[in-house]
Amino acid sequence: MDAMLKAASRGGMVAEETLDPVDWAEVQALSHRIVDDAVDYLRDVRERPVWQDMPEEVKTFFAAPLPRSPQPLAQVYGEVARNVMAYPMGNIHPRFWSWYMGSSNFTGALGDFLAAVQGSNLGGGNHAAALMDSQVVDWCKQMMGFPQSASGTLVSGGSMANIIGLTVARNARAGIDVREHGVAAIDKPLRFYGSDQLHSCHRKAMEALGLGNRALRRIPTDAGLRIDIGALRAAIAEDRKAGFRPACVIGTAGTVNTGAIDDLQALARLAVQEDLWFHVDGCIGALIAIAPENSHRVAGIEQAHSIALDPHKWLHAPFEVGCALIRDASAHRNTFAVTPEYLESTPRGLASGQWLHDFGLQTSRGFRALKVWMALKEHGIEKFGRLIDQNIAQGHTLGMLIEAEPLLELVAPPSINIVCFRYRGDGLTGERQKALNTEIMLRLQEEGIAALSDTTVHGQHCLRVAINNHRTRRDDLDLLVRETVRLGREISKSGTAR
């Protein structure tokens, strides 16, 4: 400001600046090239390694200091192409089966681009992006069999969707105004219940809600790793007798380890009998509800008080987008809404639309809906349902291929699309067998063949394949079995694990 005043006093004026290009035609030409490269990138994804480690010069590139002067945009893009696009996590590749991630789609990527160009803030207001955000939430309600009167919000992903649902559950079942008085004023400690296969985000939720990890009681599971209903009833009765307030039961529609789905109908009945909030963590399997051959697996999900689901998984939206659905819209809004003087509604104009930030923790919200909306419009929900059925069928096919191979064994029978298995080894057990299988997993990754993860099921270490990918084909499964056996033999023969 002082410099501007001095310049003005000398009869001059400091030139005003902008981030817009000086030469729009040049930027347009580069943008066309970027789109062409992007199409090639996805079209040829099978020709590249699933994952590859970065050489030291690339890692060093990311240690460069803060840029202080400009450089041409074409040069900037060149650096991105060489150092970022060439070394992805790999989850769009047809043989990426680590953890549980969707594989994106090109239309969704275009949606993200257009959303960024438009630049709308989805805190709410009277504009088209806000209406589309609400429309996508309404579509999610329809997928889950929720009533139109229910509420919902788009969030970053499943962890946040679960936190939203459990926050509403806490406030609805606390017996006091938690927002005004805090959790310390609750007369009896709240208890939440879920299986011992619960995702770790639920512990984080308990901690963030001020209830603490001990408020979440883990219930044993049956042979199929589903929550034991009898043990759950006993735990609720025991807690009531001990002076706790049972508040919420969390049903899991697809556990991370094996894809096991709790008996949601039984949990819905129990929640009514015990006067509990019924929340479903459906981040892995809720969308099975739209799959014609497998929807029966999540029967009862429509009876939940709240559901967490992930469009960036089985709707394959580019990261990130999750969704929290709440049956009681007023309980949802009352949990989060705050109306300061600078965000009051008006009868007309920009502030006359609904404030979407009243339904979650973020005031500033990205335009997540467009990438979901465009892909659903292009393909239709029926195709996404068939793709879910396809992945589940592939999971069972892989299970049969493993059972047919003497050197491999299933650690748990596939429930949906997650397969847990291991290389037997010659008489190896315990830590030695774990080391062998871990080495197989790492070499599959390092050789760019496939990306698997590992876990422990029934006390046994195993490799884990989560087939949540619309690009996976039967040939990929055959290749995995062959390469796993090859590597297992090589490592066993050499007797070394790097």
Image (cartoon, helix red, strand yellow):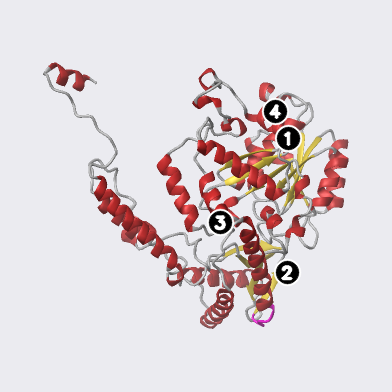
Q: Amino acid at mark 2?
A: Pro
Reading the image, the residue beneath label 2 is 413
- Vertical placement of residue 24 versus 440, above or below: above
Task: Please identify the quarter of the rendering in which residue 23 is found.
Answer: top left
Mark on residue 183? 4
Q: Residues within 10 Å of mark 1 (few under 14, many from 20)?
A: some
Q: Secondary structure at mark 3?
A: loop
Q: How far across and how far down the image is residue 105, in percent?
A: 50, 58
Q: Is residue 31 left or right of residue 47?
A: left
Q: Which residue is at 32% across, 55% downward?
A: 32
Q: Amino acid at mark 1?
A: Asp
Q: Secondary structure at mark 1?
A: loop
Q: Amino acid at mark 4?
A: Val
Q: Nearer the viewer, mark 2 or mark 1?
A: 1
* Quarter containing the N terminus: top left
Q: Nearer the viewer, residue 447 or 104?
A: 104
- Vertical placement of residue 420 versus 277, above or below: below
Mark on residue 328? 1
